[in-house]
Structure formats: structure tokens, C-alpha cells
Amino acid sequence: MCSISGIFSIGQGAPALREAVQRMNTAQTHRGPDDHGIATINFPGGEVVLGSTRLAIIDTSAAGHQPMNDPVTGNWITYNGETYNFKALRRELHDEPWRSNTDTEVVLRAYGRWGADAFRKLRGMFALAIWDDASNQLVLARDPLGIKPLYYYVAKNQFAFASELRALLASGLVRRALSPAGVDSFLANGSVASPLTIVDGIRQLLPGKCLQVKTGADGNVSLHEVEFGNSTHERSTTSRDEAVARLRAELEESVRMHLVSDVPLGVFLSGGMDSSALVALMSRSVRPKTFSVVFDERGFTEAPFSRAIAERFDTDHTEIRLSEDRLIGILPEAMASIDQPTMDGVNTFAVSGAVKDAGVTVALSGLGGDELFAGYPSFRRALRLGTMPKRLARAASAVGSVVLKPSVQRDKFWQLARSGGAPEDVYRISRQLFSTDVASEITRREAEIPPGNGHHPSIDIVNAISTLELKGYMTNTLLRDTDTMSMAHSLEVRVPFVDAKVVDYVLSLPGEWKLPAKHSVPKPLLVDAVADLLPRDFVARPKMGFTLPFEKWLRQNLRDQVSSVFEDSRLLSAAGLNATAVKNVWNNFLQKPRAVGWTRPWSLYVLAKWCELNRVSC
């Protein structure tokens, strides 16, 4: 696991280019504290400078130094990720001799053999850049599910890229200006939806995409994007019983592959269904080293459940107790680690820091289970609306607007009833942070309607919502925050449920197998796949989730801190926010916290603080 960066420049730019890449390397040292490197490649009419910082996971020797060169083809690579099937690919390549035991060298030689088709063969998480010496082009690629981030900026004669947006800012090539569309997306979703970013001119490469960068016919930088991660989700299973058995086999294979490591490895154990299933599957291969974060507040801790799982599978278990004072104490450091504004992420920062302090370099997470196995309310909501006659929906809307107390929930209820119940509408409204009207008040301009995430209508409502959750909330919030906040501590997090083969198989199954009309337990398909491992009464309990008591903090411990930001009109204006509208959100929350929800004032606070810390303004 590493950070990557680089600049493709038409014309001569060294040493200025090397200095810019060095600044990006320095800005990403936390992602790769074990090694760093820079390589300069000249081509007719220009230069390419590649940068890397390395967190050594597989083959920790100096042989894994990056950027890495293939002397046979003349190609170079800077690579961030893990390719779990690299040993099988190495055998397929039949190359001799090998200079390292890294997956990086395998990916580099695979590209030399198969070109961009090599990316289809990689099973894992990755964001990479390869200098193709024969065609004089820079090739970028990102894994099909967007586990690893990849940002880029293009000017007339230069193209720059990095693992983090803040690294591109550190390069000195990018103007520190807010993107109005990025702000609108953040206010709509609580995070900025790809390919947008919060900074004007910086884009994010979409998952499963390959971007070819070269000198165009007009002498300027030319970009050509190709999709390599597309899947048809073809169904090959004829019965639910067969699907349960096949899913079990796919999950066991994915977990085994995710255990490849030359450094200490552990697993996050919250005590919920997904992490418990992950520990159960891991125990088939190794004795898991589990970590659970516990709180003194009974309403926020799952300690009894995580202890029960640790005892059942005889794990090497560690409980990490986080007090309220400790959590609030790390907030400034967490805020400084946010790469793009987000309403989430502080919880992952806290957990990752504690696990890293315990001596672990790689941790497995159960992230992705809710998206794949219908664990969110959006699934049941879409099913209800999808089968409800439109006349009844309009009547429910009228009743709800009168009966429900004024609140964000009532507004969403009204929007859902009026929407017609299409899966994309249900997803958008369910995940909505601020409505378009409120967002327009906050920015004092007409908010742009957030773009869709590429979903095409499907008659299978469950699979439609699953696709939307995977491409939306999971990619743009959960995976992005997990990457940023874990790598802030030089901790690699792996997500076995978010495996391309597993996802493709689960999406090929009928939605009714994952969420039948009558079901007594959450995520019944996953439960049935691990039924012999976990007790039935354990998996039947309601979903709890790992959350921090922000509602309480914002009204008590953090109240003065947040109020001081919301009283600073200059700071709010620099972040593109209308001070009056922001104060209204804040005051409404203080008066009716449950009706407004803590995520709304918190998100506005994060946006303003992020802009201040990173010197970005509109």
C-alpha cells in the first residue's frame, strides 16, 4: 500500500517538476512511511515525473522500491493497492527472473504483456499509473469498485495526479478555489460524488476506468478514458439453496485471498453481523486477531456482542476503550486528516489509530455487507413504494404532511410520496443531507441537481438499490473515508465483501432471495451462508452500527467551538456559505436536535473548517 503521484508535462520542466512531485510525496508521507521515490522519464517533446511513498505489506525488502521500472519494455509504474491474485498471475506470465516478490512487479509485467487488458485480470484494490514507453503515454487505472482513490488535474500542457486531493494542492499547480458543483454535491450527499471534487479543476477517476494521457494533435494534453471494469452480472444459479452454497464458497475464497500479508494483520470486530461473519470465515483459515472499540456509554457500545464472537472463535482479542474525553481530544487531528469534506469519518479515524497503536499494519473490515445484502432501510422503503399504487402514495403524502411533526423526516416522507417511488429517487432522498431548496438557501444561489451515478433502471428493486448504494454512498463516503482516515495512521484496511467477484455474483441473484417479503432476520442470504458458524439468536438482533455521540457533543462539549465558527461570517463566506442560513440550521438543531439531526450542522462545520485548514475559498 502506498501513495502515488506524478506529472505529465509537454515541454521541459525539470527541476521544477521534480520539486512539485516531491511536495506531493511529502504531503502523502503518512500513506507510505517506509520508503519514497521519484523517477523522471524523458519522451519526445516532454517529461514525466512519477512519485511514490510506500507502506510495505508484501515483500518488505528494498526490492519493492517504487517507482519501479521494467527493463524489458522500458515501462514504469507507481502503484497503490493490493492485487490478491498476484501469485497466480505471476505463474501465468512465466517470466524469469523476477527481481522481487511484490505484486507491483507482477502488475507492471502484466501490463507489458497484455496492455490495458491486464487491469481486468487484477483481483484486488488499486490505483496506479504506468508510463507506457512504446506509445509515449501515461496510463492511469482505478479498481472497479473504487476502493482506492485517484485524483487528477489537467491544464493546457500539464497533467498531474495523486492519491489525495490535498497532495495536488501541495504541488503548487492547482488554484485553491472551491468548486460550486462540488459544494452542491456535498450539501446534497454529505460527501462529494465522483467524478466531482470540492476543488475547482480537480477530478476523480471513476471506478473501473482507465485514463490514457498523451500529447494531442494540437500539441496540448490529450485524455482518452476507457472502461475496463464493466460487468453484466449474468445469472448462473438456479435455486436459492444453490446460491447460499455458492455464496459461502465465494466469501471463503475472498477472505483467504485478503489474508495475504508479510506484516501483522487483524480484523475490526464491532459485534455486528458483517464483522462477525468476517471473523467466522477467517477462523476457517487462521486464528483471527480481533480488535473491538468499546465505550462507557451503553447506548453506543457493542462490547457484549463482540466479546461473544471473540470467545466463540477463540480469537486473539483486544478491546480498545475510547472515552469521551479521548474522542473529543483527537477531533482536531481527525479534522486535519480529512482529504475532502465529509459528514462521516471521525469514527474510522479513532478506530484506525487505536488498532495501529496496537501494532497492526493491515486490518480487515466488514464494510460492504449492508450494500450487498440489503441491510439499509432504503431497500425496504423502495420495495414498499414500488408496490404502492400512486393514488395511495399521494394520499399518504397528504396525511404525512399533516400528521408528522415538522422535521427533516417529514420533508423526506413528502418527497418520497411525491416521487413515484423509483429506486433512484428512493436512494437519493434517503441519502439526502439537505434538500435542493435548503441547499440553495445555504449557498444563496440555485443549487445544481446532483448527477446520477450511472445506474440504469431495473425491474429488480433490491438489485437497483444495491447498485445505487454501492456506486454512491459506499464509494463516495464509506470507502473514501476509510481510505483517508486509516492511511492517516499508515494502516491498510481491506474489505473482503467489496471484492469484484463477490459483488458480481451477489448482484446476479434475484432481489427476493436477499430480501424476501417475509423475513425474520436482517440480511437473510448472508445469514444463511454462514448459518453453521453463527448462532441464530445472535444474527437476529437489530442492526446497531458504529456511531459516535455527536448529537450530545454538539449540544455540550463542542457547542462553543461550533458556535464560534458559525459566528464567523468571513469564514463562512470563504466556504461559499450564507451565514444567516447556516445559523438557522444551527439554532434549529439546538432547539429540536432529533427533528434536524446532528449530521446537518456538523457537515456545515466540517466544510467551513476544511476550507480554513486547506486555504481553499470560493
Image (cartoon, rainbow, N blue to C red):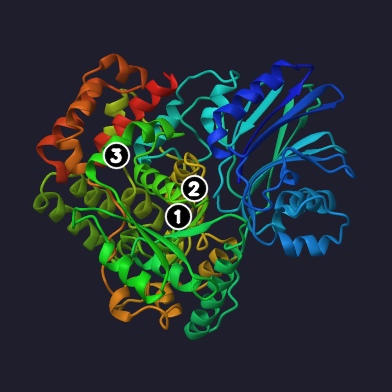
Tell me the distance, in whole angstroms, between the alpha carbons under discs 3 and 1.
Answer: 19 Å
- Looking at the rendered structure, the secondary structure element under dot 2 is loop
Tell me the quarter of the picture where residue 610 sits. Answer: top left
Q: Residues within 10 Å of mark 3 (few under 14, many from 20)?
A: some
**Tag 1 residue:** 468
Q: Earlier in the sequence, mark 1 or mark 2?
A: 2
Q: Which is nearer the eye, 307 or 126?
A: 307
Which disc, if any, is residue 453?
2
Q: Looking at the image, which residue is at 54% across and 50% down? A: 147
Type of amino acid under label 2 = Asn
- Left or right: residue 508 compared with residue 596: right
Q: Earlier in the sequence, mark 2 or mark 3?
A: 3
**Tag 3 residue:** 435
Type of amino acid under label 1 = Leu
Q: Looking at the image, which residue is at 58% across and 54% down? A: 263
Q: Looking at the image, which residue is at 26% across and 71% down? A: 541
Residue 592 image offset from top left, x and y in percent? 11, 40
Which disc, if any, is residue 576?
none
Q: Are marks 3 and 1 in contact (CB under 8 Å)?
A: no
Q: Looking at the image, which residue is at 25% across and 48% down? A: 412
- Left or right: residue 13 compared with residue 404: right
